[in-house]
Image (cartoon, grey):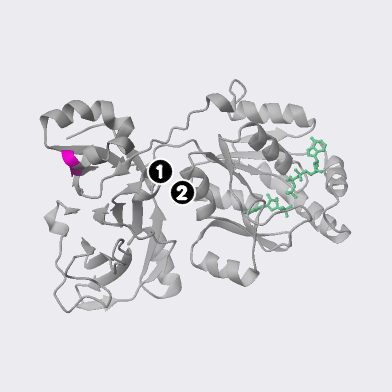
């Protein structure tokens, strides 16, 4: 497995590799971006190679010890890598499912440059690529007690295979019927703060005196399952997501009146009087914020529950559909273990031998009809894909063959 653009290949001299790197089996790939050499790979447990990162600075001739942010890819049987836009490296894991085969290592993006300044070290950051233009995640926001959870529960019950809930982390104590991992990941503050520093969260905020946050993993768990992700987050969180790279629909839920909001919050019976007062105070500011220009795409008033639910379904274009006829758009395929990757005219080509495609035929079912005639005539087939410039880290597979 290897890259075709030999400009970016670099042989690490013997004896210079960091400990744990197996230079004999070449269980690593080297990629040059600017004046640095990124060595991606590492030790093997016999079946799988770890995907670690080491950086060699050509200008100083020294190895760097970077801070590595984000969750790194699980070991694979092999991988290829290639630079993207001089600020990221695309890593393609062989013999892995579509949901886990594309990974990006940010090496010189504005985000890692900012983190490097903050931390005073070299920084790289892992992000998992998302295959296809999946349905946009939905951010639902609004003051405490307005009925967000109730509306989301109805949606999940009626459309269980369409929607998946992004399970947030929180430092607040669980309520009587709340289940860890289902309603929230209930977490200690020090642990959550550490994970926020490690960039494991898409957003986080202090809400009514507790820390709440959406982990990248929570959203990925839903999108990897081919479902549309629903986020129930406060207005601060919505603002952060809006400013970030997740392309979502933003819906704000309003109460019919402040008195009704107070009535619902009290009737729920989950907070102390002091907590209710705090939530109501915050609600006034949130209701003002909800009207801020450009933050929310839609505002729904939750007066009569059934009417509001029908309006929500209309917004999500669900009123003429049942869950039974839903077809997820995500395609299922597997990159063969033995492949190479090249970059041409802003597109990437994955090359693999016909015999490899043959082996992978069952996982390439969606390509099969297109590939069949080609495979008969040629010994090698290529799968075109592009990295979307609109949705960073989205990989739009795959219409053409070379
Ligand atoms: N349209 C409605 N009419 C009357 N009661 C409602 C309506 N919608 C929700 N409720 C009730 O209001 C209470 C608060 O609803 P819910 O817990 O869904 O609010 P929430 O916005 O998710 O609150 P939080 O942000 O605190 O989690 C619940 O007891 C729920 O049954
Ligand atoms: N910014 C975020 N806000 C979140 C998240 N998960 C929930 N929330 C919001 O917190 C309040 C209070 O929730 P409760 O369960 O204690 O009643 C509510 O407005 C939620 O929308 C999150 O991950 N990030």
Q: Distance between the residues labelled 1 and 2?
A: 7 Å
Q: Name the residue that disc number 1 marks.
A: 391
Quadrant containing the C terminus is top left
Residue 384 magenta-highlighted: no
In terms of secondary structure, where does tag 2 sit?
Answer: loop
Q: Determine the image quadrant of residue 122.
A: bottom left
Position of 141 compared to 176: left or right?
Answer: left
Position of 287 compared to 267: left or right?
Answer: left
- Respond yes or no on whether mark 2 lies under 8 Å from ligand 2: no
Quadrant containing the N terminus is bottom left
> Which residue occupies 76% across, 28% down?
306
Residue 227 spot, x, y in % from top left: 52, 39
Which segment is the magenta one? Answer: 351-355
Q: How many residues crowd around disc 1 within 10 Å: few (fewer than 14), some, or many (20 or more)?
A: some
Position of 304 compared to 236: left or right?
Answer: right
Q: In this view, does 163 lie above or below 289?
A: above
Q: Is residue 192 above or below residue 347?
A: below
Q: How many labels does the image show?
A: 2
Q: Name the residue that disc number 2 marks.
A: 245
Type of secondary structure dominating the magenta stretch? strand
> Which residue occupies 76% across, 42% down?
146
Q: In this view, which residue lies farthest toward the top?
A: 320
Circles 1 and 2 in contact, beta carbons < 8 Å:
yes
Counting residues from the N terminus, which is met first, the one under dot 1 or under dot 2? 2
In terms of secondary structure, where does tag 1 sit?
Answer: loop
- Respond yes or no on whether mark 1 lies under 8 Å from ligand 2: no
Q: Is residue 68 above or below residue 19?
A: above
Residue 22 spot, x, y in % from top left: 22, 71
Q: Determine the image quadrant of residue 30.
A: bottom left
Residue 61 spot, x, y in % from top left: 19, 78
> Which residue occupies 25% across, 55% down?
81
Q: Determine the image quadrant of residue 57.
A: bottom left
């Amino acid at each position: 497995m290897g890259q075709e653009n030999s400009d970016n290949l670099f042989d690490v001299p013997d004896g210079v590799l960091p400990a744990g790197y197996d230079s004999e089996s070449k269980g690593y790939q080297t990629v040059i971006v600017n004046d640095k050499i990124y060595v991606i790979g590492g030790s093997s447990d016999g079946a799988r190679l770890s995907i670690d990162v080491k950086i060699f600075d050509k200008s100083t001739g020294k190895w760097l010890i970077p801070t590595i942010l984000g969750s790194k890819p699980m070991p694979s049987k092999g991988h290829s890598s290639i630079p993207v836009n001089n600020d990221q490296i695309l890593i393609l894991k062989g013999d892995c499912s579509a949901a886990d085969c594309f990974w990006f290592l940010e090496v010189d993006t504005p985000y890692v440059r900012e983190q490097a300044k903050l931390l005073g070290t070299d920084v790289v950051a892992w992000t998992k690529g998302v295959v296809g233009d999946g349905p946009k995640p939905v951010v639902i926001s609004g003051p405490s007690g307005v009925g967000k959870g109730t509306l989301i529960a109805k949606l999940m019950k009626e459309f269980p295979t369409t929607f998946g809930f992004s399970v947030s982390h929180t430092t607040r104590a669980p309520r009587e019927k709340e289940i860890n991992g289902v309603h929230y990941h209930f977490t200690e503050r020090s642990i959550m703060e550490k994970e926020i520093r490690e960039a494991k969260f898409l957003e986080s905020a202090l809400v009514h005196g507790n820390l709440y946050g959406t982990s990248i993993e929570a959203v990925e768990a839903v999108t990897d399952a081919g479902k549309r992700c629903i986020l129930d987050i406060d207005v601060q969180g919505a603002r952060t997501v809006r400013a970030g790279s997740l392309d979502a629909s933003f819906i704000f839920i309003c109460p019919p009146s402040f008195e009704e909001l107070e009535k619902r919050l009290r009737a729920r019976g989950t907070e102390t009087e002091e907590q209710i007062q705090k939530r109501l105070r915050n609600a006034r500011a949130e209701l003002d914020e909800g009207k801020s220009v450009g933050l929310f795409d839609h505002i729904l008033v939750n007066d009569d529950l059934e009417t509001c639910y029908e309006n929500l379904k209309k917004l999500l274009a669900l009123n003429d559909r049942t869950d039974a006829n839903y077809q997820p758009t995500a395609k299922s395929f597997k990159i063969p273990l033995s492949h190479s990757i090249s970059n041409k005219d802003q597109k990437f080509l994955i090359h693999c031998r016909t015999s490899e495609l043959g082996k992978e035929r069952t996982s390439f079912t969606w390509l099969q009809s297109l590939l069949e005639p080609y495979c008969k005539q040629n010994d090698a087939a290529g799968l075109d894909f592009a990295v979307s410039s609109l949705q960073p880290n989205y990989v739009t597979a795959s219409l053409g063959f070379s």
